[in-house]
Image (cartoon, helix red, strand yellow):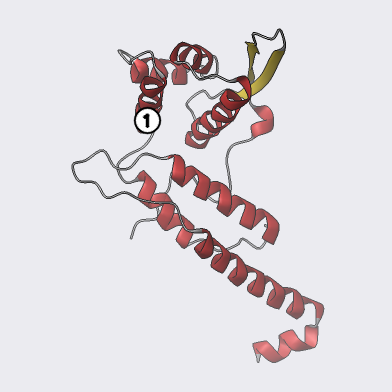
Amino acid sequence: MSTNSLIKLESTLDVSKLSTAKLQQNFVAGNTAKVSVPQCDGKNFEGVLYTIQEFEEASLVLDFDEGPHLFHNFRQCVIGTARDDWQIASKNADDTPEGFEASLVAFKRIYMTNETKQNLINHMKSLKKPRAMSVHDFISRLRTLNRYVAMLPDADIPNAPEIAKLPESEIKIQCISVCIMHDKFDERNSNPSLAKVNES
């Protein structure tokens, strides 16, 4: 079972260093809404997913529900090679919300293989909390990875099985296991005599 995931437990994405696109919507009532969305340059697959996720949330706030608005504003969120990739993915797409969603799928596929989604699931199931990472951060990161799974398209092959993200119950089991191991580690470090007994 392969665990060669494009997205790892310890993120290589520093969101604080991302440039942003300032999107705006002028409503009929006369009020204006503005949202800053992080831009992606295509060098980091997690960065691509992060930008898409933030854009989708911004679209709800700014009420981008028409194809032209979606295409125009998302283009502001991709820079460098990612903009070239987006142009390829959206070429000849219908100027509709459905056409935009299809373009997003094509855009994601540029950065992944047919095994990427399953590999991420396998990676998550095999994860163990690094000693330097807090339990809270480990659980939070696990949920972030699970959210990315839901964003990935299934394999682009005939009769490809649909791969769902991990159920919350499975994540909770992993979290409970991590907390138990963490408590045991803390107990051994706070009680040297207990550690010596366990090691003997």
Q: Residue at x 47, y 35 (%)?
A: 45
Along the line of sight, which residue is nearer the eye, 72 or 183? 72
Amino acid type, residue under disc 1 in the picture: Val
Q: Position of residue 63 (x, y in %)?
A: 58, 20
Please state, as top left, top right, bottom left or bottom right, where the C terminus lies in the image: bottom right
Kindly give the residue lying farthest to the front in the view shown: 29
Q: Position of residue 64 (x, y in %)?
A: 54, 19
Please state, as top left, top right, bottom left or bottom right, where the N terminus lies in the image: bottom left
Q: Dot 1: few (<14), some (14–19), or many (≥20) neighbours within 10 Å?
A: some
Identify the residue under disc 1. Answer: 105
Q: Residue at x 33, y 15 (%)?
A: 94
Q: Residue at x 64, y 33 (%)?
A: 15
Q: Is residue 17 above or below residue 81?
A: below
The answer, for residue 174, to whether it is visible in the render is yes
Q: Position of residue 39 (x, y in %)?
A: 57, 22
Q: Is residue 46 above or below residue 123?
A: above
Q: Quadrant of residue 139?
A: bottom right
Q: Is residue 86 left or right of residue 14?
A: left
Along the line of sight, which residue is nearer the eye, 28 or 40? 28
Q: Is residue 100 above or below residue 121?
A: above
Q: How many marks do you count on the picture?
A: 1
The answer, for residue 4, to whether it is visible in the render is no
Q: Position of residue 133 (x, y in %)?
A: 67, 57
Could you say whether the residue bearing mark 1 is in a helix, strand or loop?
helix
Along the line of sight, which residue is nearer the eye, 25 or 152? 25
Q: Is residue 105 left or right of residue 61?
A: left
Q: Quadrant of residue 199?
A: bottom right
